[in-house]
Amino acid sequence: MVSKELLELKKVLEEEKSALINGAIEEILKWASYKARLVDYLKNKELTPEEEKLLKEIVAINERNKRIIEAGLNFVQEAYDFLTQLASQKETYGKNSTSSRPRILSKAV
């Protein structure tokens, strides 16, 4: 039988994904805290083969969430760099300065 903590951890990771996609910072923080408590509880527990299989699923879901976080951070960094460069050009060349080369914020566009 699979422990309720493992099932709960899987559910928490799905909720975390939803919060990440929606940009719900408060929820993300809530789920991260709860996830940490569940992981702490599970770290010294002996797992059955069935639980080991579920744990592999959980690790895959966690990796997916990590990629979502990294994509969001990359977008924020690109936007920050773009705005910093834009502000720098305005200060250097005056208020009506334009860049001769159009810029995009993401390579996915």
Image: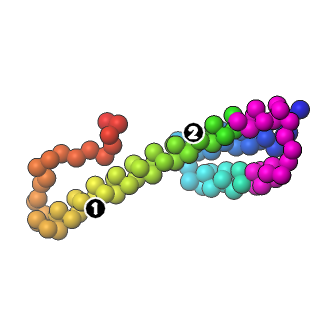
In the rendered view, tell whether residue 86 sits above or below residue 20.
below
Magenta segment includes 72: no
In the figure, is residue 21 to the left or right of 30? left
Identified at 71% across, 54% down, the residue is 36
- Mark 1 / mark 2, whichever is N-terminal: 2
Q: Tell me if I can see residue 15 in this picture.
A: no
Residue 96 location in percent, x, y? 10, 59
Distance from the alpha carbon under mark 1 to that under mark 2: 30 Å
What type is the residue that disc 2 sits on?
Answer: Arg
Identified at 35% across, 36% down, the residue is 108
Label 2 CA crowd tier, 10 Å (few <14, some 14–19, many 20+) = some
Residue on which the image places disc 2:
64
Residue lying furthest bottom in this view? 91
Using the rendered view, name the quadrant where residue 5 is placed.
Answer: top right
Q: Provide the secondary structure element on which disc 2 rests.
A: helix
In the rendered view, tell whether residue 66 sits above or below residue 97.
above
What type is the residue that disc 1 sits on?
Answer: Thr
Residue 85 location in percent, x, y? 24, 60
Residue range corresponding to the magenta coloring: 37-56
In the figure, is residue 54 to the left or right of 47? left
Q: Judge depth for marks 1 and 2 and give the one in front.
A: 2
Magenta segment includes 52: yes
* Disc assigned to residue 84: 1
Helix, strand or loop: magenta stretch: helix
